[in-house]
Amino acid sequence: MAAPAVLAGLLAGCGASTIPSVHSEGERLEKGRRALERREYNVAIELLKSYVANNAGGADVDQAIELLGEANLGIKEWAEAQGQFERVLRDYPESDSAAAASYRLGQALWGQSRGPAFDQEYTEKALAQWESYLRSYPGHWQNAAAETRVQLARERLADKLARAGRLYLKLGRTGPARVYFQRVLRDYAATAVAADAELGLALTDAREGKRNEAMAALREIQSRFAGRSVAERAARELAVLERQAAKHQKK
């Protein structure tokens, strides 16, 4: 009695479903598509897998593979989805499904990535894929979504570098700290994290005894980023340096 229960679990997508009967391969593909639209992901996977297996070389197999990848995405089978989208791009590069596969390959890679505290291999792969998609398929309907995701990936990579800079600064290692903050400004100047990197460089100057340079940089940050938390942090750090400068002048 355990087997039916297991099968039922496997067939559940967003709610338990069963595999519908089909009478032709065209019907199988269409029902797979409809199951995907209803978010019955496991039903879609079973139907589309069968269609792909039964129709190697068929006119619509590229479309079925791309839809299968979408279904894999739906249940967070990131590596499986990656494989399906890569297959479309490798075996059917001129397919009408290639643009969607290129965009969604980025999603599959992003799903395997981790936050900025961890290794960013898959974030970098996802970023490279979305940038490749935008170059290869200008005007595709997912371009705007890809641009948003590119920015999200760049923000995460910048955050990773800024975190490293702050850690080195906390440890008193100003040389490596400066290198990481400068990398943020060089590679990710158009991110929100860039302001934090500027603050990091000002604090690095202060740690190295370059008080005047640090104070000038902090005033600039206050002015350019007024209303943001980085400006408030700059104001606090500036106040500390101004007190130190006043004490030095009294001596």
Image: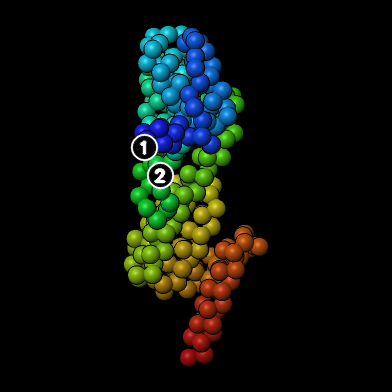
Image position, residue 68 (x, y; %): 45, 25
Q: Residues within 10 Å of mark 2 (few under 14, many from 20)?
A: many
Identify whether 79 is placed above or below 137: below
Say which residue appears at 51% left-offset and 39% top-offset: 150
Q: Which residue is mark 1?
A: 2
Q: Residues within 10 Å of mark 1 (few under 14, many from 20)?
A: few
Identify whether 112 is placed above or below 218: above
Q: Please, what is the three-letter code of the amino acid marked with disc 2?
A: Ser
Identify whether 110 is placed above or below 209: above
> Looking at the image, which is closer to me, 135 or 72?
72
Image position, residue 225 (x, y; %): 62, 60
> Looking at the image, which is closer to me, 75 or 166?
75
> Is residue 205 in view from this perspective?
yes
Q: Please, what secondary structure does the residue beneath circle 1 have? A: helix
Q: Which residue is mark 2?
A: 113
> Is residue 138 in view from this perspective?
no
Say which residue appears at 44% left-offset and 33% top-offset: 8
Q: Please, what secondary structure does the residue beneath circle 2 have? A: loop
In the displayed structure image, the side of residue 2 where residue 189 appears, left or right: right
Question: How many marks overall?
Answer: 2
3D distance between C-alphas at marks 1 and 2: 35 Å
Residue 178 lies in quadrant: bottom left
Say which residue appears at 46% left-offset and 36% top-offset: 75
Q: Please, what is the three-letter code of the amino acid marked with disc 1?
A: Ala
Say which residue appears at 49% left-offset and 17% top-offset: 21
Tell me the quadrant of the picture where the N terminus can be found: top left
Q: Specify the farthest residue to the bottom.
A: 251
Between tags 1 and 2, which lies in front?
Answer: 1
Image position, residue 122 (x, y; %): 38, 41
